Amino acid sequence: MSYEDKFDASLSLLRRLHPKQITANLDNICTLIQQNNGEDELVQDLLSSVDTPLKVVKCQDTGKPFLCCDYNRDGDSYRSPCSNKYFPVQADDDELPPFPSNTIRQLEIKANDAFDVYRDLYYEGSGISSVYLWDTEDDETLDGFAGVVLIKKDTEDGSGKWNSIHVFEVIPESASTALYKLTTSVILDLKNNDDSSLSLAGSLTRQLETIQTLEVDGGSNLETSHLINLGTLVEKSEYNIRNLLQEVYFDKLKDIMLKDLRSVGDLGDQKLENLKQSELIKGLQGL
């Protein structure tokens, strides 16, 4: 089997398994690949291609929590946007882990502050956000860079979990314009605490590509202009994803409840309730 066939087969298998166990399923597939073939490149491509719920780790230097994903990972350690250090601390070796350049790091600090305000406004003051940037050019300038914006929020009672992952690339088009490529993935996990058998889980991914003007007049600098443009695009993308989630999840649920189940009203009450529950679970599992 070729490399492409193995990669496609792995993704196809993950799509067919229960989305609530996506992290465990991905780990098992990667372990199986390493045990049988030892293809590290295939494992790395799978880890970077499959979105999983974000993990929270505490920065040992600042005590602040930060979010982990494949974009701030090096081996088993993750870089904190607060201190720019990897945790757990890596053993000394000859190869240094990846770090952004000084220019990009300064922009990363400002981006974390900006999206923390965004999180506070749009997520009712709760949740966690982290931003990671990296260089796409050899020189230490803002002439091309990429990054990821991560936002995670869990409800206090554990009934809802929201994970949004915004991966972007900024490509200068001219002195006053830049091309922004944004890929947004939202992983949603909902359950009814009163009925453990009723749950919704899944993800949606959408892409957005646009050319934006870089406003560097009136006291604004290039960094501020990039942050404004990125914030606007993330806001727009999350708004669109929320609307799509409502259509995919809740409109589908409404169709099941009102159309497929209402037509069996001549059955006994207990039998009707059992049938409703059975059909509802089948419908939810098919989302």
Image (tube, rainbow, N blue to C red):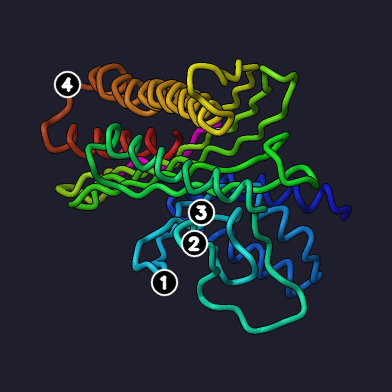
Residue at which label 4 appears: 266
Q: CA separation, marks 1 and 4?
A: 65 Å
Q: Is residue 53 above or below residue 183?
A: below
Task: Find residue 22 and name its label.
Answer: 3
Q: How far is the residue under mark 4 from the one under mark 3? A: 40 Å
Is 229 contained in the magenta span? no
**How far across and how far down the image is residue 56, in percent?**
40, 60
Q: Residue 10: percent from the left, percent from the top? A: 69, 52
Return the disc, 1 or 4, that comes first in the chain's sequence.
Answer: 1
Find out whether the residues at labels 2 and 1 contact each other: C-beta distance under 8 Å. Answer: yes
Closer to the N terminus: mark 2 or mark 1?
Answer: 1
Alpha-carbon neighbours of circle 1 within 10 Å: few (<14), some, or many (≥20)? Answer: few
SS at circle 2: loop
Q: Nearer the viewer, mark 3 or mark 2?
A: 2
Mark pair 2, 1: CA separation = 9 Å
Q: Which residue is under mark 2?
A: 80
Give the vertical position of 218 relative to 100 (above or below).
above
Q: Quadrant of the N terminus?
A: bottom right
Side (left or right) of 129 relative to 90: left
Q: Earlier in the sequence, mark 3 or mark 2?
A: 3
What's under tag 4, amino acid-wise?
Asp
Camera-near label (4 vs 2) is 2
Note whether 214 is above or below 116 in the view shown: above
- Which label lies toward us, 2 or 1? 1
Prevalent SS, magenta region: strand
In the picture, measured across the screen, residue 85 lies left or right of residue 156, that is right
Q: Quadrant of the C terminus?
A: top left
Callout 4 crowding tier (Cα within 10 Å): few <14, some 14–19, many ≥20:
few
Q: Which residues are magenta?
A: 199-205
| Residue type, numbered disc 3 | Ile
Q: Residue at x 23, y 19 (%)?
A: 262
